[in-house]
Image (cartoon, rainbow, N blue to C red):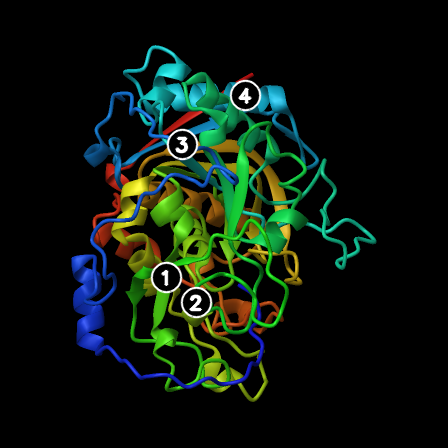
């Protein structure tokens, strides 16, 4: 969650959706007018930027394209691999992480004889694979100069983000499975956060990177992903004009003009619709001040579309804006965005990074209560709902251990006085998006039907 800023109002035509249409659309997993194209455009990456324009033969893979879409071939299965030597005081160990990923993938795909076979269950020669990382949760090193176009973190201990070591091992595993390195794209929503978190410094040889837009801005509506009035930035994919979800809520008039119909729409990144065939999501084990938790589902919703601030418009407690702008629509926004057909079909593998988690004050260090812990686990799943349910339980268990209420009981209206904490902005932050995503068929929410397997490596 980032604070919004004021901007000049710009008129356009008005478009509204009724509450009945919204709820009916969510129940069906789609909304009328959410996309003007039933199938995504799939051109090859430009040769001067990413990969080649030449046709690439598609090698067969063990799973069919239909079976790989969410919840994937293993609904309800969550593999947790823990290694006590994987993290020491926030510093990750590459050797331990390599072992964890190999074991986790082979455990996820029980019919695979080797870890390489497990990767080939999802990916084959010719696949263009995107790896979605999470830089939010980075911890700035002392004296970091925010004006410099470079990392702001200690590269040995960057904070609660998608670990460099995990990303590197995923790339290496894909290469061993036959994926060409120039067909691998590491990406994130905002370019400046991607650079500040150090990802450009650890980029594995031969792979590419790109982001959907330049940075957080007050408007969040520019289709090309650039910031109006500033020099154009490289490595920016922008958003697909024809693929979007329209929901009947928006940011306040201080930020979006009431006659601008774009305020009701969130467009999917061109990285998803045009530049990759399959996506590996690497979310982080964290709580969140509006969504309750930010795990696999939120990494795909807020990480892949524009105009996300409307899901949690806010004003600081006690401010003039608080009474009217402190709202929380994450519970409906998240499943609505993840259920976009292109996202649902292409996000085939989830690797939740629980090496360094955040149990309070998430998602970022700008909150006064931001606190991390070395949990030392990685999670593997094709089902984001089951994965998020397990992650939610783990965060709540750590919160109880540290004397905090469960995330669903937090917020300004929370019990035991915790709602008065300066970091709490919203009246509630219940992770309702997880069971609702289950209702939409994105995965298994019923805890009795989730197969959570724990493996501990020495």
- Residue 78 rendering spot, x and y as whole percentages: 35, 33
Q: Is residue 133 visible?
A: no
Q: Nearer the viewer, mark 3 or mark 2?
A: 2
Q: Is residue 361 visible?
A: yes
Q: CA distance from mark 4 to mark 1?
A: 36 Å
Q: CA distance from mark 3 to mark 4?
A: 14 Å
Of the image marks 1 and 3, the number of the one nearer the N terminus: 1
Of the image marks 3 and 4, the number of the one nearer the N terminus: 4
Disc 4 residue crowd, few under 14, some 14–19, many 20+, Cα 10 Å: some
Q: Are marks 1 and 2 in contact (CB under 8 Å)?
A: yes
Q: Are marks 3 and 2 in contact (CB under 8 Å)?
A: no
The residue under label 1 is: 267
Of the image marks 4 and 2, the number of the one nearer the N terminus: 4
Q: CA distance from mark 4 to mark 2?
A: 36 Å
Q: CA distance from mark 1 to mark 3?
A: 28 Å
- Residue 168 rendering spot, x and y as whole percentages: 56, 28
Q: Identify which residue is drawn at 65% across, 56% down.
A: 365
Q: CA distance from mark 3 to mark 2?
A: 29 Å
Return the residue nearer the eye: 210 or 336.
Answer: 210
Q: Identify which residue is drawn at 19% across, 67% down.
A: 32
Left or right: residue 33 versus residue 266 is: left
Label ID, residue 348: none
Q: Secondary structure at mark 3?
A: strand
Q: Nearer the viewer, mark 1 or mark 3?
A: 1
The residue under label 4 is: 98
Q: Quadrant of residue 203?
A: top right
The residue under label 3 is: 380
The residue under label 2 is: 307
């Amino acid at each position: 969650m980032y604070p919004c800023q004021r901007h000049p109002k710009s008129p356009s035509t008005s478009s509204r959706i009724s509450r009945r249409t919204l709820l009916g659309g969510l129940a069906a997993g789609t909304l009328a007018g959410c996309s003007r194209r039933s199938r995504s455009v799939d051109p090859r990456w430009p040769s001067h930027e990413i990969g080649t324009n030449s046709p690439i033969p598609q090698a067969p893979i063990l799973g069919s394209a239909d079976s790989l879409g969410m919840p994937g071939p293993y609904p309800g299965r969550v593999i947790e691999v823990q290694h006590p030597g994987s993290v020491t005081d926030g510093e990750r160990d590459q050797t331990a992480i390599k072992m964890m990923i190999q074991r986790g993938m082979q455990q996820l795909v029980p019919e695979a004889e080797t870890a390489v076979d497990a990767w080939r269950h999802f990916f084959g020669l010719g696949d263009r694979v995107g790896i979605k990382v999470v830089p939010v949760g980075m911890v700035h090193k002392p004296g970091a100069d925010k004006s410099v176009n470079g990392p702001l973190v200690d590269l040995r201990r960057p904070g609660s983000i998608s670990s460099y070591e995990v990303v590197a091992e995923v790339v290496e595993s894909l290469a061993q499975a036959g994926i060409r390195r120039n067909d691998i794209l590491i990406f994130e929503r905002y370019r400046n956060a991607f650079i500040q978190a150090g990802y450009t410094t650890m980029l594995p040889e031969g792979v590419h990177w790109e982001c959907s837009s330049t940075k957080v801005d007050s408007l969040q509506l520019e289709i090309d992903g650039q910031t109006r009035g500033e020099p154009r930035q490289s490595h920016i994919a922008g958003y697909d004009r024809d693929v979007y979800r329209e929901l009947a809520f928006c940011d306040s008039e201080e930020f979006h003009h009431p006659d601008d119909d774009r305020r009701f729409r969130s467009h999917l990144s061109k990285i998803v619709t045009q530049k990759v065939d399959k996506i590996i999501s690497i979310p982080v084990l964290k709580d969140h001040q509006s969504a309750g938790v930010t795990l696999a589902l939120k990494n795909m919703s807020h990480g892949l579309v524009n105009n996300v601030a409307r899901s949690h418009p806010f004003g600081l407690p006690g401010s003039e804006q608080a009474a009217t702008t402190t709202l929380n629509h994450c519970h409906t926004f998240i499943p609505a965005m993840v259920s976009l057909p292109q996202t649902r079909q292409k996000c085939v593998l989830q690797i939740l990074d629980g090496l360094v988690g955040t149990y309070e004050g998430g998602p970022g260090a700008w909150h006064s209560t931001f606190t991390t812990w070395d949990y030392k686990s990685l999670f593997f799943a094709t089902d984001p709902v089951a994965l998020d349910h397990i992650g939610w339980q783990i965060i709540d268990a750590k919160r109880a251990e540290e004397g905090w209420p469960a995330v669903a009981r937090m917020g300004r209206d929370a019990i035991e006085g915790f709602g008065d904490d300066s970091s709490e902005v919203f009246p509630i932050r219940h992770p309702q998006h997880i069971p609702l995503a289950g209702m939409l068929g994105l995965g298994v929410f019923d805890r009795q039907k989730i197969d959570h397997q724990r493996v501990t490596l020495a």
